[in-house]
Image (spheres, rainbow, N blue to C red):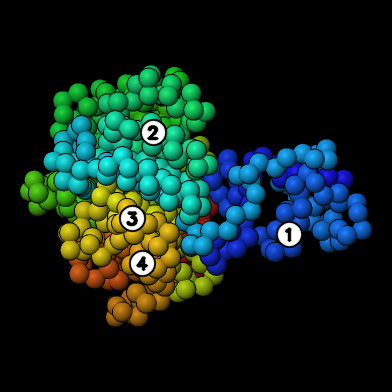
Amino acid sequence: MYYLLNERYRLCGWDKLPYAVVDRKYGSACVVTKPVMDTLDLCNGKIDFSIPLISNEQRDIAQELLKEGIICQCEPGAELKNIQKYRLYDNRYMQTVHWSVTGRCNCKCKHCYISGADDKYGELSHNDVMKIIDDMGNCGVLNCTLTGGEALIRSDFWDIVDGILERDIRIFRIYSNGFLVNETFLNGLKERGISPEINMSFDGTGTHDWLRGITGAEKAVRKAFLLCRDMGIPTGAEMCLWKGNSHTLRQSINDLADMGCSNLKVTPVTNTGAWKEGGYGETDSLSEEELFSTFYEYLDDFYEDLPRMLVHLGGFFLADGNNPDHFSLPAVHCYNDPLRASICVHARNDLYISAEGRAETCMAMSSMPAEFQSKFPLIQERGLKECLTDSAYMKLIDTRSEEIIERNEKCRACRYRTVCLGGCRAGAVMYHPEEILSSDEMVCKMYRDGWVSKIIDKVTKLQPNAKSVEAEIYKKM
């Protein structure tokens, strides 16, 4: 009896995570034990599992792997592809890279984190970009998403895509403002056999043009959404909320659902980058109270309309209109040992690379002052392997939540500390620029003013059968 690893899988290991099976289709890694890995190593088309040297334990493991579809029976001498063979990377595991491949943009967004219209950060050279791609492959990165600025504006965009795919890294999302999302671009994706989600900004029905700074921006992005729908390419959206478009939330969500958009994340405009430079913060930003009230009031609309898409009201509420009997509370964290959780679980598995090549926790950090960002390493100078081994980035994401709680007196005294965990690091820096381990005041207000309880009570009233793991944990606090 001969076995071969299914073509969908490959075998990998990383520092502190030596044995894993990678699902190449979804870019995910499943940790396995050494006996399982030893058995998988034998599934190479050359080992007969009926010989006495194969233990009964290995035969039993092989049968389980066969049932799960990870291996298949084969003829003697079948060849395992080189990409599938076990490889150990001597750096820490990083599942996804979210990459601003350029800081340039063809829009003039009034709220841009990185002031893309002013070309504040420019873009790395072709050689530096290709070096980072090579580093990603040599560090065992599984997934990549591309953003900017406007990612599609780079003249070597397809070189970047091809370089990533050649290293067996899955591209599952490309962010764009929609102006360059046309048939030629979508056909380019199809020619390469990929269908990543095209995630486009949509900042309110009738208000999109103002925030984007260009007349006709809404018309262009609507056309792009419909084109993607007609060509079978999945789409998602991001909406930035401010005083001038908060009243459009319901209509905007319903319009996006009608255009075939599968998911939307709504976040408030923050007083950073171009928004701050333009002087909009004082008059046009929503206060925390106004933001939470807008989200809270929309819950009635959500359960009445049940838009056929996933709606994420940033940090406040998440639910899918296709499955209304389940909802999530993003601000409520669920861990068996919460104080030992990484201070930013997102960044522990998802690295953001800024337009200038810095390894950072998320895109929001790229709006911080230069002296703050200079603490994070430039990948083109130090190499991604070092950034994922010994760097300010690794030290930060390896920090545990207990350190935040210990540093902040009000956190130590708070009954919600084991589910809040100090909130978001980018959110904390917005309020306390000098201290990344400070508390996130917005999340603090959400708990302190009872918004989590209000959400649970309202959803229970509107959708009595709706369940939430986070809600159940919160109610036990």
Assess disc 4: are there few (<14), some (14-19) or many (≥20) residues with their C-alpha within 10 Å of its C-alpha. Answer: some
- Amino acid beneath label 1: Asp
Look at 31% across and 79% down and name the residue there.
407
Horizontal side of residue 167 vs 416, given as left or right: right
Task: Report helix, strand or loop for mark 1.
Answer: helix
Q: Pick whichever of labels 3 and 1 is earlier in the sequence.
A: 1
The residue tagged 3 is 379
Q: Pick whichever of labels 1 and 2 is earlier in the sequence.
A: 1
> Marks 2 and 3, how far apart in space?
19 Å
> Marks 4 and 3, how far apart in space?
10 Å
Q: Are marks 2 and 3 in contact (CB under 8 Å)?
A: no
Task: Report helix, strand or loop for mark 2.
Answer: helix
Given residues 137 and 215, the one toward you in this image is 137
Q: Pick whichever of labels 4 and 1 is earlier in the sequence.
A: 1
> Marks 1 and 2, how far apart in space?
37 Å
Quadrant showing the N terminus: top right
> Marks 3 and 1, how far apart in space?
35 Å
Look at 80% across and 46% down and name the residue there.
46
Given residues 100 and 204, the one toward you in this image is 100
- Amino acid beneath label 2: Asp
Look at 42% across and 73% down and name the residue there.
400
The residue tagged 2 is 159
> Where is residue 224 shown, x and y percent of the image?
34, 24
Q: Pick whichever of labels 2 and 4 is earlier in the sequence.
A: 2
> Where is residue 324 shown, x and y percent of the image?
50, 42
Given residues 287 and 130, the one toward you in this image is 130
The residue tagged 1 is 38
Q: Are marks 2 and 4 in contact (CB under 8 Å)?
A: no
